[in-house]
Amino acid sequence: MPDYRQLEKDFLELLKEQKAYQEALALIQWDLRTKIPPKGVDQRSEVIGFLSQKVFQITTSEKMKMYIDSLKGKASNPIIQRSLEECEEEYNRNRKIPEVEFKEFTMLQSKSETLWQEAREKGDFAQLQPYLEKLIEYNKKFAEYWGYEKNRYDALLHVYEPGVTTELLDEVFPALRRSLAGLLKKITASERKPDSTILQKHFPKQAQETFSLEILKRMGYDFAAGRLDETIHPFAIAINPRDVRVTTRYDESDFRMAIFGTIHEGGHALYEQNIDQAMAQTPLADGTSMGIHESQSLFWENFVARSEAFWENHYSLFKHIAPDEFDDIPFSDFYCAVNEVKPSLIRIEADELTYCLHIMVRYELEKALINDEIEVRDLPELWNQKMEDYLGIRPQSDREGVLQDIHWAAGDFGYFPSYALGYMYAAQFHQKLETTLDVESAIKSGNFAAIKNWLGENIHQYGKLKKPLEILQDVTGEGLNPEFLVEHLQSKYARIYQF
Ligand code: ZN
């Protein structure tokens, strides 16, 4: 009989080796997006390629396969068992694609990403079209290799949101869309028109940073296990659970970018910082899915930082830090302005209410592409039509339409739904937390420890030990339910827009 305990030890050693390469890669990623001098980029790209290959080799190695086969079902604890399952999933995902095809796909991806920037600038969809067609062909092939039960799109969805199916989304999204459309109609008809232009006053970078740092501190972000830096595209990155960094971008004529952005990324970072240290050197030291990750950033951004209770406490601090020009803005004008609803063409500029509608446009189109129901050449027109149907506005160019996001050009299909799922998960968690804590008073007090601890205990500590829908079920006692998001938006906007 094999010595299982020894095999386990060896398996954990292999995971450590894999983590070492991944940690180096993460640190390089952070450096690449924040600090690297331009001339350093070329060689660094080679280093990334080299290290990524090492990770790929480990995850697809015969040694890995041997550990999976010998230890699965015989592991001495749940962390090892789940790690084996994760490794098996990754092994299969990578091994099922013929090496030549994977290589061709990666090359196509990087060419297409570069081309996308140019095509977007010019609003020239035709330039990108042949690349998109090929990338979709590859995605369809990969989905076939990976397998699925009912819908080819499920295989892609699984990569980002395991357990969530096309069937579930087709049930939930239309219901959510109808409710959002109803709310949007009431808001548009309202005579109350919050004016966000009152927020666009000069606000020096240094002062924005002071405020952002203070809020991060209050959220319980551990600065001994992280740091805040400046970048063009803000992100949070876990180098390891005790080194989780946040970046932000300062716009001196609109503080919302930095302040809400930092809080959003801070929410992602809290998740990673509070994963059980026992899993630090395993593949479980990561958010369980894109959707659950997004639920954590949105929880802090929308349910905490865009709430009336939050500003009741923090408006005086804000005014103290902000320049004098902000002094004459009455509290209610300020609060309503940061929550203005206004259908817009660009997803990343969308408000809390219309954001999910942007996602549905993308979801429906990419699902249809993967299932051969529409042609790539018809995308711009279909996109514009859906924008008009769902948001009541029509892009005048593909630059502000189908070309705005990098995802498809980068070959990523199946990713978009996670954003909308994050909104729904966040609302469900929030509702559950309210049954055990007076959330509004906690937010108003400016002491977020109880909120942070609850999220840590119920969600963060598990990392990938639980699957997304498992966490949702364990925390809330039910599956995906859009009603809580609708209720939250209904009660918030009924007050702001007085309907
Ligand atoms: Zn996010």
Image: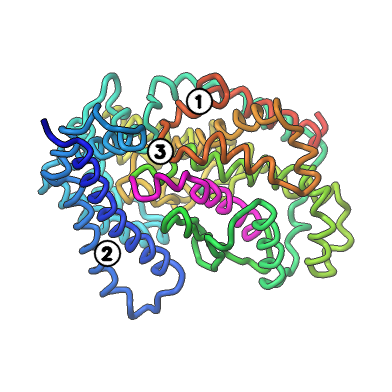
Label 2 crowding class (10 Å Cα cut-off): few <14, some 14-19, many 20+? some
Q: Cβ of disc 3 within 8 Å of ligand 1?
A: no
Residue at the spot 66% in from the left edge and 58% down from the top edge? 217
Mark 3: amino acid: Lys
Q: Secondary structure at mark 1?
A: helix
Q: Position of residue 247 (x, y in %)?
A: 53, 62
Of residue 375 and residue 266, the one placed in the foreground of this image is: 266
User: Are dots 2 and 1 in contact, CB under 8 Å?
Assistant: no
Distance of mark 2 from mark 1, alpha carbons?
38 Å
Residue at the spot 75% in from the left edge and 48% down from the top edge? 447
Q: Which residues are magenta?
A: 257-282
Residue 382: quarter of image: top left
- The residue labelled by disc 2 is 48
Q: Secondary structure at mark 2?
A: helix
- Residue 271 lies in the magenta-colored region: yes
Distance of mark 3 from mark 2, alpha carbons?
25 Å
Distance of mark 3 from mark 1, alpha carbons?
26 Å
Q: Position of residue 242 (x, y in %)?
A: 48, 57
In this view, the mark in front (2 or 1): 2
In this view, the mark in front (3 or 2): 3
Give the side of residue 383 with respect to residue 478, left or right: left
Whether residue 346 is visible: no
Residue 327: quarter of image: bottom right
Q: Counting residues from the N terminus, which is met first, the one under dot 3 or under dot 2?
A: 2
Give the side of residue 226 with respect to residue 50, left or right: right
- The residue labelled by disc 1 is 173
Q: How many numbered marks are there?
A: 3
Q: Secondary structure at mark 3?
A: loop
Residue 464 circle label:
3
Residue 22: quarter of image: bottom left
